[in-house]
Image (spheres, rainbow, N blue to C red):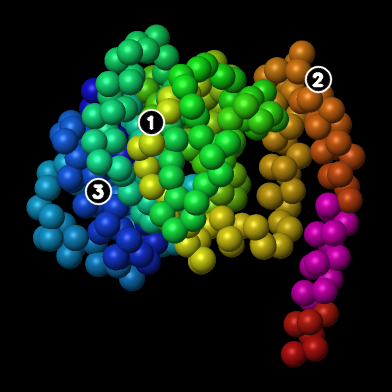
Amino acid sequence: MKIGIITASYNRPDLLRRCIDSVRSQSYSNWVMYVVDDCSTVNIDELSDMYRDPRLSLQKLPQNVGANHVRNVALARALHDGCDAIFLLDDDDFLTEHALQNMVDQTQAYPNESWFVFNVEGYQRVLEPYTFIQQPFSFDYISDYLLGKKVRSDKSHLIRADAVRHIRFSTQVRNGDEWTFFLQIARRHRCMALPNIVKVVDYQNDGLSVALSGRQYTFQKIWLDMKKPVLCWYYRPLLRRAATRSLQSVFRFPVRLLLLAWQQCQYLFASRQR
């Protein structure tokens, strides 16, 4: 199995090197790591000279477009190059020892599955024990993760190429809302949960999770928040939780639009005061 590792990066040279080192030190060797830099101040050419590894593909975009677009660029290259599966690895995270070999061994045990979900552990943050997968089981991403609690917290995803051939991350928002990508896969595929820890997540104080939790309303974000349960209901029409949350989101939509309008008025007033 040729694994395409997709890494979006922006202004984190030290963390990126740690991420790359964790991949290059793997015992499993049939991989290509697609690092796409979002027009940061990092000198990609220096990394090329440092590693000189043909399995490491480095690309710097000419303008800053956001993590979702960057991931789409890397994903398209991985599929074009004939990778059999893709693995998502952010630049501030890194692989555990023998992670790729463990993943490949697990996928061989389940040849009919296309989507594998693995445990992660925190680098400087202890994750709650109840969020860890304890034994292999099959689950539905929509009912058991997005709308349920059978699977919780961050996870690592290894997905066969055929399952994501025509699927991309949403560029309606620059960063976050990865569910838009996974929900499209969930239309036709279930997830296979596996207990191996394959990735270490290093939560940053200036990372996307922190930034997204405190950002203001935008129309794109409000629209996606409404679409999320509606799409879940559309794909799982017999799921009562999906129907309930879909109706709730529709009722909340005009309220959030009013909040957005109020924020814009405050912004305009503050600008005039300056």
**Mark toward the viewer: 1 or 3:** 1
Nearer the observer, 264 or 10: 10
Residue 178 appears anywhere in the view = no
Give the position of the N terminus as an image quadrant: top left
Residue 215 appears left or right of 166: right
Which amino acid type is shown beneath numbered disc 3? Ser
| Residue of label 3 | 22
Which amino acid type is shown beneath numbered disc 2? Arg
Q: Main secondary structure of the magenta part?
A: helix
Q: Residue furthest bottom?
A: 274
Residue 100, percent from left and from top: 27, 33
Q: Secondary structure at mark 1?
A: strand
**Mark toward the viewer: 3 or 2:** 3
Which amino acid type is shown beneath numbered disc 1? Asn
User: What residue sits 29% from the left and 52% below the top?
Assistant: 19
In this rendering, the answer to whether 236 lies above or below 97 is: above
| Residue of label 2 | 240
Mark 3–mark 2 Cα distance, whole angstroms, equals 43 Å
In this rendering, the answer to whether 114 lies above or below 250 is: above
| Residue of label 1 | 196
Please report the bounds of the magenta region as a residue range: 256-268
